[in-house]
Image: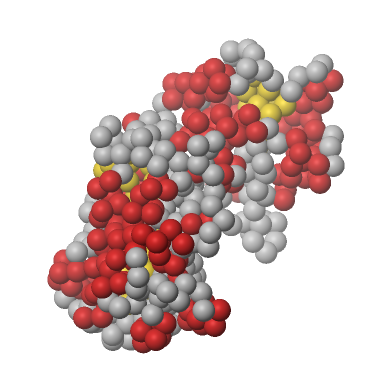
Amino acid sequence: MFEREVYEKRREKLREILEDGLVLILGNDEAPMNYPANPYHFRQDSNFLYFFGLDEPGLAGIMDMEEEGGDIIFGDDIDVEDVIWMGPSPSLKEKAEQVGIKKTRPFNSLQDFLRDAISRGRKVHFLPPYRGEHLLRLAHLLGIRPEAVKHWVSVDLIRAVVELRSVKGPEEIQQMEIASDITAEMHLRAMKRARAGMYERELAGEIEGLAISLGGYISFPVILTIRGEILHNHYHGHILREGQLLLVDAGAESPLHYAGDMTRTFPVSGKFTPRQKEIYEIVLSAQKKAIENIKPGVYYREIHLLAARIMAEGLKELGLMKGDVEEAVSQGAHALFFPHGLGHMIGLDVHDMEGLGEDYVGYDETVKRSDQFGLAYLRLARKLQEGFTLTVEPGIYFIPALIEKWKGEGKHREFIDYDKVEEYLDFGGIRIEESVVVTDEGCRILGKPVPKEPDEVESLRA
Ligand code: GLY
């Protein structure tokens, strides 16, 4: 974990934003895979990690917004049976002291503590639960029906947490560099090892294992596919064949659970075909221009639209799109090829804070979510600030079902040459992604560089 002062300062800052009440943050518990004692890899709740740092199940934290020193960790000391099966562990008191908390109480006293506070008229702020178990626990602790929990979620707390977690401190950037370095190693390994005749799963397993061996864990399930047009394709059962493109979208967590996220698309044979290279260069140019234009004060929505225009321009040069590029993008015609947003916040979660509600994280009173197909999926639209960390991940995809649907509807016929597009139905998709940190006058790519220029990719593949 970080130094104790980091957690003390975070809780102090929350107290400066939220005027009153208690804040309840539930830590995660073990989640069973197929029977109770056989759990998935444990992942602590990111908000609990942010304020309380302790990376183990069975804990809850209370922060008192009106009393410095009123913060409490609820949990239990382990007994001799736990020691036999899981090994020794410091006492709860010792662990709490490591993050600057003096008060600890048994977990089963949390309900009485909260009900007593509520009976004295104190407000209890809590965040939206994303696990069914937490939904039920909140209902039980607070004496409300599970269906009512969502009505009592604290929007003030959501906004305060988003304000704090959006701007990363130097210790967080350092963790994100570590995560991005491990992520880079995963991609370099896939780029060096991919060969025609292999199964996708051989590579997917290898890079996941590499993340673990380097001290991380995957930050989201590995996407490694020759069907790159399926945006989040987790199927790994195809055999790689000469002439295909392989899209790898994968990332690792740092030891303190900050996420890496990167995408590379490269030819299974050593070289891009001319057609693959043409599309690749369009995506690369959009990605590089987007990165060049990121700086504090710029709306990420504008960067998304800039990338969209560059890709529409490139597709027009190839005869796939036509007409006025500005108009095509403003009407959303490019979304046939680029149906997702340019990127998202990244931090303790790969889609940082998404569980709190995307609109609180990526939008504000100055920019509202569009309902236009494509633009509507943009997770981050708001004005960028120094210290934000985010992904930049344009892509061009040929999605047969979408092409067929739009063609059938005659959609955006003035901007799309469907006859030409149909020549690309077997193309797949290309995405190129990096994570960046917004600096005082621009942005910096996180982690060790991984080739993305076509000639660099080809020489690495060779
Ligand atoms: N890189 C995976 C995602 O952004 O969802």
- Which picture quadrant has residue 261? bottom left
Q: Is residue 254 visible?
A: no
Looking at the picture, the colour scheme in use is secondary structure
Q: Is residue 293 left or right of residue 221?
A: left
Image quarter in which the C terminus is found? bottom left
Q: Residue at x 28, y 49 (%)?
A: 291
Q: Residue at x 67, y 64 (%)?
A: 34
Q: Residue at x 25, y 35 (%)?
A: 441
Please state the horizontal and vertical placement of residue 77, each as a whole percent of the image: 65, 32
Q: Is residue 34 visible?
A: yes
User: Does 216 sit above or below residue 419?
Assistant: above
Please state the horizontal and vertical placement of residue 424, each as a whole percent of the image: 37, 83
User: Does 20 sit above or below residue 310?
Assistant: above
Q: Residue at x 59, y 42 (%)?
A: 356
Camera-side residue: 325 or 135? 325
- Which picture quadrant has residue 438? top left
Q: Is residue 451 left or right of residue 94?
A: left
Q: How many marks?
A: 0
Please state the horizontal and vertical placement of residue 330, each as a whole percent of the image: 43, 58
User: Does 85 sit above or below residue 433?
Assistant: above
Image quarter in which the N terminus is found? top left
Please state the horizontal and vertical placement of residue 58, each as a whole percent of the image: 65, 39
